[in-house]
Structures are given as structure tokens and as C-alpha cells.
Amino acid sequence: MPTINGSDVKRVVVACDAGMGSSVMVASTLRSKLKKHGVEVIHTPVDEIPADASVVVCHQGLASRAQATAPNAVVVPFAVFMGDPAFAKVENAIVQGQDLES
Amino acid sequence: MSATDMQAKKNREGSGASAQIQRVGRFLSGMIMPNIGAFIAWGLITAMFIGTGWVPSEKFVLLVDPMILYLLPLLIGYTGGRMVYGQRGAVIGAIATVGVVVGSDVPMFLGAMAMGPFAAWCLKQVEKLWADKIKPGFEMLVDNFSIGILGAGLAMFGQWLIGPVVSKLVEWAGNGVDVLVENNLLPLASIIVEPAKVLFLNNAINHGVFTPLGAQEVLEDGKSLLFMIESNPGPGLGILVAFMLFGPRMLKAAAPSAIIIHFFGGIHEVYFPFVLAKPKMIIAAIAGGMTGVLTGTLFNGGLVSAPSPGSIFAYFTFTPPGGHVVMLLQVILAAAVSFAVASFLLGFGREAKRENEAEEGASETTAVPA
């Protein structure tokens, strides 16, 4: 299981099916929270997650595809698009330097 | 480990027939979606300037046919090629697509979706034959002429065989849709579409199937109901409003902002989790979807281009003159029916009350910032 410490996270990839709709929305809310901690947030289609991605955030229905595309990345699945505990988990891990794992 | 985590773990480890289907769907919709902007440009021009449009114009109507017959299929073939073999695949995909486009009087979207990736795959296979064997200094010559020669051959092959075959297939598919419409059977599509949608096959179905078939209908009738089967924001709206009023606490809090994003922003994904959390809600989605489609078939509804994203604003933009009443009926009735069914399934709040009480009793509760 891939693991990463929050303080090593430099970039978070938000993935959705097309990489044009929901991932853009989630990325923009996440970006506003993570920017001040020096973490970049990008969005991509789930089949085109960059090979060097370390943390991927996507809906749980797409998590298996995300993990298959980026086997070395920590995939953090969420259930609802707004106010999901998973977003707070990622933010807290980055702010407080906790470990994140798939 | 919370229920969400366990569910996620299950999803990740499940070999995922659904992931496989999603991937195929993604391949089809992936050729269309990057080009939606071009569809919108074409849709705007069509809605404005065709004979039945807002401001018919003999000059600007000349843009309509070349854009849908050539520009859009070529963009699709180009994008399909790029998905298989990068920039070189994109170029040969576009070359080969010309072959299926020429001589066809229907929009060759399906032909482009087959030919673009196929041409790129051919190039990839052929180039494997001489990979690493080219003498230094001859790479550019070989690279350019391999695309040129293979591309010319594939364009001819497409014109000779693939074009006529796909034309025939599209004609049959179109006839099949006509039969469904004439017999008022099109609402049955919702039985497949709505469940597939919340499994994140929304783009695959809409842009892989309905957009190509619908565009062909627009050329014949000036509008198509097929654009409104998957994209109608009504069913999702009804479900979200039901959750806002009668849902369990966590989902209730998230519903209002989801309503705005779904209905006005057109990002339907935000309501999928609500259905996935209570799978029986799919009945509400199907009932709402069928209502919308049935209303459309009875009163001859339709849009001039693919409303993407499926926002109410896109619906207004692409409704032809005189069609707004039917369009609004399709959305409102779909929302009303899905709301009624969803509210009933939620027991008008009784179920949520039970769950909230049970949750308070449980030790593990998760605070959810609204």
C-alpha cells in the first residue's frame, strides 16, 4: 500500500472520468485550501493521471481505475463532492504532516 | 475504519467489471468531450441561422453543413488518434477520417470514432517494424513519409469501404431510434440510462451514443430529443430536493449546494453520491427520466445541439424557437416525478429520523463541515 507523509506532498491530483467537470470543481475548492501551504492542485481524467503523481483524490466509484493508472500514488477516495471528510483528511495530513495511505 | 473507507476498499479491490465498462466508455466519450466547445459553436450557429432558427440568414447558414460534416468529425478523428498514439496518431487519425467523411451526407461521428483510433493504431504497429533500425539522419524522412503514405492509403480505404459501411449502420441506428420514437418506446431508454449514469457512465452514454445519433437527427429535423435523454437535469434535481427536505442529516446538509451546481452548473456528478448512498433512489431517477422523455416524445421536444454540461442554461440556449414550453415541461415534470418518488422512498423524513437516532447512539460519528 503506497504511503506518503503530508509534509512531502507537493502536488495533489484530482481525477474524474472526463477530467473536465467534477474534478475541476473539486480541484478549485481544494486549491483554495492548499495554496497557502505551497501545494499545487491539478485535475486530470482518471485514465491520464501523471505517472509521477503522489496523491490522487477521486470519487470512490473511480478509485480502482485511479489506482490502476497510478499504482504508486496514494489514492484518497471520497463519497460526496462537497464537504466530504476525505478532503479534510488530505488537508489535515498536509498541514500537520500526518501520513496518508491508499 | 469507517463505512466509506470500507466501501472504497471494496471498490478498489473488486476487479471491476464496472471499471472495464467505464474505460471503454471513457474511450468513446474521450474523443467527443474535448471537442464540446466546437459542438457549442456549431449549435449556436445552427440555432440562430437555419431556416427555422431565431434569425435565419442565407449567408451564415453556409457555416452549418461544413462544420458538422467536416470540422466536427475531423476533430473527433484527430482526438481519437491522439488518444492512441499522441500527436502523430492525431495527424494520421484526421487524414484517415477524411476518407469516411467524403461522400457521406450524414455526420460521420461514428465513422470518425472508429477510423481515428484505428489509423493511429496502424501507424503504431507499422512503426514498430523499423523502430531503432533507421540510419541516423533519416528519421524525419521516414517519420513524415510513413504518416503520408499510410495516411493516404487509409483515407482511400476509408472512402472505399468504411464510409459506406458506417453510413449504412448509422442509417439503421437512426431507423431504430425512429421506431422507438414512433411507438413511444423511447422512455424505456431511461431504464438503462439512469442507473448507468450514476455509475459514472454518464459521459460514455451521452457523448458515446446520443451525441453522434442526435447530431444526425438535427441535420434532418433541426432538433433532436436524443440530446435530452441523459442530460435532462430534472430527475437529479427532484432527488436532491427530496434529500434536502427528507434526507438523513449529512446528505441533507450537502443537498442545497449540490442543487445549484447540478441544475445551474450542469455537473450532474454531484447527485450521483446521493443515489449511491441510497440505491433505491435509482427508481426515482428512472421514473423522472422516463417522464421527461415521454413528455418530449408526446409534444415533439428536442434541442439543436448537445447541452454539455447538462445545465438549465445550456437547455435554454439550445432550445429551438417555439420549443421552450415543451423543454420546460420536460425538465419540470421530470423533476416533479423524481421528487415525488424519492420523497416517498425516503418515507417523507421518517427514515432519516430513524437513522439520525441510530447515529447518535453509535460511538463513531463523523463531523461534516457544510
Image (cartoon, coloured by chain):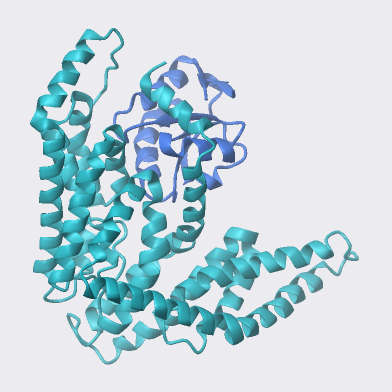
Q: Is residue B214 above or below residue B278?
A: below
Give the colour in which the image draws chain A.
Answer: blue
Residue B279 locus on image (x, y percent): 28, 37
Residue pictured at 58% horizontal, 59% vertical: B83
Question: Toward which corner of the image does residue B152 lie, by quadrant?
Answer: bottom right
Is any atom of residue B263 visible in this view?
no
Residue that lies at the very extreme toward the bottom in this rendered image: B58
Q: Specify the quadrant that holds the N terminus of chain B.
A: top left
Residue pictured at 71% horizontal, 63% vertical: B124
Residue pictured at 83% horizontal, 61% vertical: B131
Give the colour in which the image draws chain B.
Answer: cyan
Residue B30 locus on image (x, y percent): 48, 58
Q: Is residue B129 left or right of residue B73?
A: right
**Across the whole image, how many numbered discs are drawn on residues?**
0
Nearest the viewer among A33 and B153 is B153
Residue B43 locus on image (x, y percent): 30, 73
Residue pictured at 84% horizontal, 65% vertical: B130
Q: Is residue B302 left or right of residue A100?
A: left
Q: Is residue A37 above or below residue B91?
A: above
Nearest the viewer among A50 and B364 is B364
Nearest the viewer among A34 and B32 is B32
Q: Is residue B2 above or below residue B28?
A: above
Is any atom of residue B203 visible in this view?
yes
Residue B159 locus on image (x, y percent): 58, 85
Q: Specify the quadrant that holds the C terminus of chain B.
A: top left
Q: Is residue B82 left or right of residue B188?
A: right
Q: Is residue B76 above or below residue B258?
A: below
